[in-house]
Image: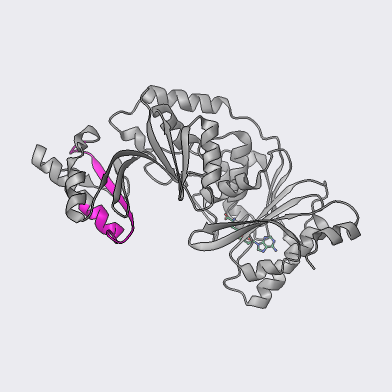
Amino acid sequence: MKIFEIIATTLFGLEEILAAELRELGAADIEILNRAVKYKGNQALLYKSNLHLRTAVNILKPIATFYAENEQQLYDNIRKIRWDDYFSAEKTFAIDGSSHGAIFTHSLYVALKSKDAIVDQFREKYGTRPSVDIEDPDLRINVHITDKTVVVSLDSSGSSLGKRNYRLARTQAPISEVLAAGIILLTGWDKKCDFIDPMCGSGTFSIEAALLATNIPPGRLRNFGFETWNDFNPALWNEIKREADSRIKPPGAKIIARDIDKKALDIAIPNATRAGVKDFISFETYDFFQTQHDSGQGLVLMNPPYGERLKIDEIISFYKDIGSRLKHFYHGCDAWIISSNYEALKHFGLRTSRKIKLFNGSLECRLQKYELYMGSKKAGKNRNETN
Ligand SMILES: C[S@@+](CC[C@H](N)C(=O)[O-])C[C@H]1O[C@@H](n2cnc3c(N)ncnc32)[C@H](O)[C@@H]1O
């Protein structure tokens, strides 16, 4: 099979994790970029990347790279690509444009100019043109410009890989599926110790943890852009899906999802059912401040409210209480908290053992780790307290 270059895009801070996922899939020549990873592989790896990668957003196949100093050069070079190798006038397409640098400053304009070039080529050759369908095109094209360098790619994912198709309903402020999976991989969860999601909302952390622990591919419930490509190989694709299904197994860890709000669980449980992991997660309506975990092990992963709607002293005291509950009732666990509220995090009252910068949507956040030691209350107090 022919080897070609592939680019997997991701979120800020997840590049190394994505590279590790790619290494496991057998990718070659892995190179870390800004919010993306470049690698080489064949058609099978392109399909596998879409099905298996938990931290990728889109899998792009570059088809042309050139320099453009102005819009005319962009138009001319895009028009030079033989578009009928990739699709035909009866098909639909969409263009995602992105540009960084001083020359091309409007991504939307880049997309528009590229669309004109493609449409004009078809019209000239066939007297007819493909139509644009932004929602559900047969072919999604990506035009990425950095200063004068233009990379034109086919988007083999079609829509963002974060759309796993299990989260049809959501509570307020859910974390994206890609970010949730990335955070779990960043924690280094061994898939053996208990996984506790005490403020689960729509259940994204627990569902992603269960998918990971059962080897269920994150893309199992969806379709991909490459399935409508001219060179689509259904036999290869079916073989890859069959092989992936044969590796699914029951999880080796207990996964617990709790929320104080019963309505959140009414959303989380159907999401887990759709994802095929409901039976592997224990859902419970509980106030975190009434809970404890005394088996001496476990990974607690929390996405508490960031407090946009609360007064600053209310949110500080909420975070202080979370820290205190963890310290006294979760001995032996590792706790990881993601929040954009740096002021409230400062008052957590526990010693931070790791800090990782991430973005939840447009919100800059920190993922912080706390090790909650076993032992006497006094020893725990000395080691855990920051002051
Ligand atoms: C930011 S949301 C979590 C979103 C979740 N990660 C998701 O992907 O949908 C915070 C959640 O914390 C819950 N919560 C707030 N206070 C709580 C408490 N004392 N005990 C348990 N859950 C609580 C809220 O009901 C809300 O669902």
Q: In the picture, residue 140 is in which quadrant?
A: top left
Image location of residue 15, percent across then percent down: 51, 46
Residue 96 on the magenta segment = yes
Image location of residue 66, percent across then percent down: 26, 44
Image location of residue 195, percent across then percent down: 70, 46
Q: How is the image coloured?
A: one colour
Q: Residue at x 68, y 72 (%)?
A: 316
Image location of residue 80, percent across then percent down: 18, 41
- Relative to 192, say whether 238 is above or below: above
Q: Residue 79 vs residue 107: left or right?
A: left
- Relative to 38, say whether 246 is above or below: above
All told, the count of numbered labels is 0
Residue 138 shows in this picture: no
* The one of 209 and 7 positioned closer to us in this rendering: 7
| Quadrant of the picture in which ligand 1 is shown | bottom right
Which residues, given as a range, are shown in magenta?
Answer: 88-113
Q: Residue at x 14, y 41 (%)?
A: 122
Residue 279 shows in this picture: yes
Q: In the picture, residue 105 is in which quadrant?
A: bottom left
* The one of 233 and 282 positioned closer to us in this rendering: 233
Residue 41 on the magenta segment = no
Q: Residue 80 vs residue 369: left or right?
A: left
* The one of 5 and 293 positioned closer to us in this rendering: 5
| Figure quadrant of the N terminus | top left
Q: Residue 241 vs residue 102: left or right?
A: right
Q: Residue at x 51, y 29 (%)?
A: 26
Q: Residue 139 vs residue 36: left or right?
A: left
- Relative to 357, say whether 53 is above or below: above
| Figure quadrant of the C terminus | bottom right
